[in-house]
Image: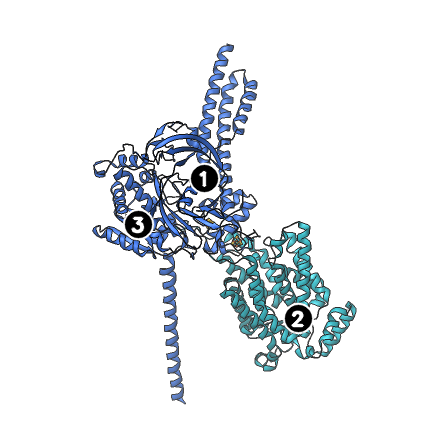
Amino acid sequence: MDYRYIKINDIYICRSTNNIMLLAILATIPGVIIEFYYFKIAVLIQIFLSVISSIIFEFIFLKLRKKNLYTFFLDYSSVLTGILLGLSLPILSPWWISIVGSFFSIIVAKQLYGGLGNNIFNPAMSGYAILSISFPILMTNWSFQNNLALLNMLNVSDMMSIIFFTDLEDYYKMMSKFSEMSNFITQSTPLEQMRIQNRSIVTNITSFIFSLENIDIYRHWILINFSFFSGGIFLLIKKIICWRVPFSFLFSLFICCSLDFFYFKHINIFPLIQLFLGSTMMGAFFIATDPVTTSITKIGRIIFGSFIGIFIWIIRVFGGYPDAISFSILLANSVVPLIDYYTQPYIYGKKTK
Amino acid sequence: MITLINNFKQHLFMCVNFVWVLIRLCYIHVKKIILFRKSRDLYGGIECISMKTSKSSSRLEYIPIPKKIFILVDDIIVLQKKIIVDVGQSVLLGQVLSLGYKHIAPIHSPVSGIVTKISQKKYNFFLNKRFSIINIRSDGKDTKIDSILMSNYKKFSPDEIIQLIYNSGVVGLGGAGFLSSKKLQYSIGNAHTLVVNAAESEPYITSDDCLIRNFAQEVIQGCQIIVWILKIKCVLIAIEDDKNIAYIKIKKEIKAFPNYKIYKIKRIYPSGSSKQLIKILFNKEVPLGKHSTSLGIVVFNVSTIFSIKRAVINGEPLIERIVTLSDRRLSYQKNILVRVGTPINYILKKCNINYKDNSVVIGGPITGLIIDDLSFPILKTSNNILCLELNFMDNRLESPCIRCTACSRTCPMRLLPEQLYFYSKSFDHNKSREYHINECIECGICEQVCPSNIPLLRYFRKEKLKLNEIIFKENMSKKFKKLFVSRQSRLNSSGLINENIIYSSNNLDRVLDKKVVCNTDIEYITIEKSQFMRKKELEESIARAKLKRNIE
Ligand code: SF4
Ligand code: SF4
């Protein structure tokens, strides 16, 4: 049967797949710019490395699978994966980290499952998860991102030398040195840090919440998250992503956090601010909404989103891993087929008996 | 201090009141949206951009009768030997060429002339169907055959009128091609409402609009006939909201009848489909697996009603129809009255359209077929000829499904096309049946909105065919098992078992291998084939009996 069929833009203007991917890439740009403003050139280097390596991996693997390179390669999905991976890595991690990560995300998580559209797990997040399991110390090196004063001490050539020319032992040594310099414990995103701090300062809770100093350190995080949020809103307006996933995600996270804040008191930070820390917004608007790995029904998407939100909170409070987003998204991805099966919509004429 | 607190309390009270009122307003508003506005619309659907019409489309144009006419006849008719004309025989206008059979209507000669040839041809683009073609050379005189008139239809019984409608070969002209007489017969005594579907089924097509503008009175007469046959209480005419002239014309006509109503409906694509139309007009959904008559509603297309009127009052069989001719940019858009069987290249030539560097689509732009062979004739159900630039499909390569849900958001049947696509691609027939692939009305919306350019409709059609085949095979195997068992028990007494089993099974295989080239519904072929098999079986058993007797 020949596959000729009619599709004229005069009838209905529909975006093509690569157009959708391009717009998603565009929407990450404000986030990237703000991160660049705070974290300097290091962010761009990480993104560049992971994008280039993921494109190369995709190219090689498509060649091996003997696919039509033109259609499969030009859909920009590997670029988007690379950008998201690069954004979620610690900025001063060595160069091979991003390459290994993109190897896992492109080849293992995507192409081995049968290419775009057949992957069960989100490629960027599975790459990140594998990295954080295999190199836990490197991947939890957030001291630079949390302490901007530290970062400002480094110039471009320092960053380059840290990323490209340090071998692993030197790297560990340097990290411990830096962690002595900073007052903080190295191993954490801001949320983790607050958790640890809070356990030590149980008595002085209220002052901790609203004291400006503490919030001030994380002000840049809030700004970064806000820029991702605005990018997400752009995508929502363009109707590329569905509002159900990010909003149910954020809402359930908010509910859990406020429960925690008013009742359990594990993390004592105002729930709304919690939504703007770490990479929550990026997870909500760019990673969880990846169409391939989300549920396809409307109710299913709400369930999917709230599942992620609840799991993030559980992992953050009770689990050992600092950034819970990747693991909870992967967990939620694995239940998508089940959700899809049980939330099929009533077809026309089934409701009226 | 106390006054301060009091003041504060008052303020608080006011604030709370205000907020409460706001919340209630919001609540009422949301309720309104959810309960009243949304439910009247159909689910999904797309707003086509170019459903507009150009000015020239209102005029009905005529083209001279062609010299050569090709009539496509279904293969099943040939198998049943229902063609009643021979090569070299002269035919008159309106003479019956082939009798109807089951769900196929009788076919009439659209011109007077001589039958020159009856050939066979396979059309690749037309779902690989095989047709027999009756070639007729017209003599240009159009001498009519004498026909039965029922201009005083109230004197006849409904059954007689339905028989006449059947004999005139009227089929649903909206696209499905279902026998109108059968529809009428089913709905006698069940229906209380007639819906006249004047909504254009697809963009670019304006033939129904043109029909109403030119023959509004006759359409109402046709409605009257149906009202009389089915004893219908109320008639609803649904028309799209941008067809003002047609609306006014109908309104003028129906002033005399109090039980006629006309509705304007929104211009969303599958609103021309009967199920969706019922949803829009009555806010009811036709139950799964049932016909609209179970709700007491019959839906007829305008042009069908028009041809019913022509058949009953004027005694004309269905031999001509209005076809819209248009291109992509609407630089010309014409409605032409053509005889059924006119070859397409003749029409294009007569209308001075350069079709050499165009690809021609027959049917609407969404579900239509691109044709390779321009000698393909106009069928009873083809309502549109669309000329598109060649190679407009460049860069539209199929890429993988990214599960963006654009298709399931717009599917008017609330199916999940992405799942259906997945299952039909991996040949998981049970799953695709579970996801209701048979409920797909083949509107083609999912295909239009898909960002990955997946020809979903093709997959679904293929899958449906395959499903039908499987059901057919299941039925056949059950039947044969039954036959085999009974035969075994019969043969047990005689000593002929072994030879006969070998002999008969070989024969059965041979018969099954010989594919019956039917092109209509497989379901239908099932009956056909099983009858054939039964005949074979009978012959065989007779032969066996004879053999037995001989031995004895
Ligand atoms: S519209 Fe196309 S790409 Fe999107 S979910 Fe449906 S089949 Fe897949
Ligand atoms: S063709 Fe079938 S599956 Fe596709 S939108 Fe129409 S009814 Fe739904």
Q: What residue type is labelled 1?
A: Ser
* Pointer 2 chain: A
- Nearest to viewer (mark 1 / mark 3): 1
Q: Which amino acid does label 2 sit on?
A: Val
* Secondary structure at numbered mark 2: helix
Vertical order, B499 against A225 (above or below): above
User: Considering the image in quadrants, where does the N terminus of chain A appear?
Assistant: top right
- In space, the residues marked 1 and 3 are separated at their CA atoms by 30 Å
The chain coloured cyan carries which letter? A
Q: Which residue lies furthest to the top in this view?
A: B552
Render colour scheme: by chain
Q: Which of B11 and B35 is in front in this view?
A: B35
- Nearest to viewer (mark 3 / mark 2): 3
Q: Report the residue marked by disc 2.
A: A43
Q: Nearer the viewer, residue B491 or B419?
A: B419
Residue A268 visible in the current orientation? no
Asked whether the residues under the numbered discs 1 and 3 touch, taking CB atoms below 8 Å apart as contact, a structural biologist would say: no
**Which residue is located at x 50 percent, y 13 percent?**
B548
Chain B representation colour: blue
Vertical order, B285 against A189 (above or below): above
* Secondary structure at numbered mark 3: helix
**Which residue is located at x 50 percent, y 25 percent?**
B485
Q: Which amino acid does label 3 sit on?
A: Ile
Residue B118 visible in the current orientation? yes
Q: Report the residue marked by disc 3.
A: B212
Q: Nearer the viewer, residue A313 or B103?
A: B103
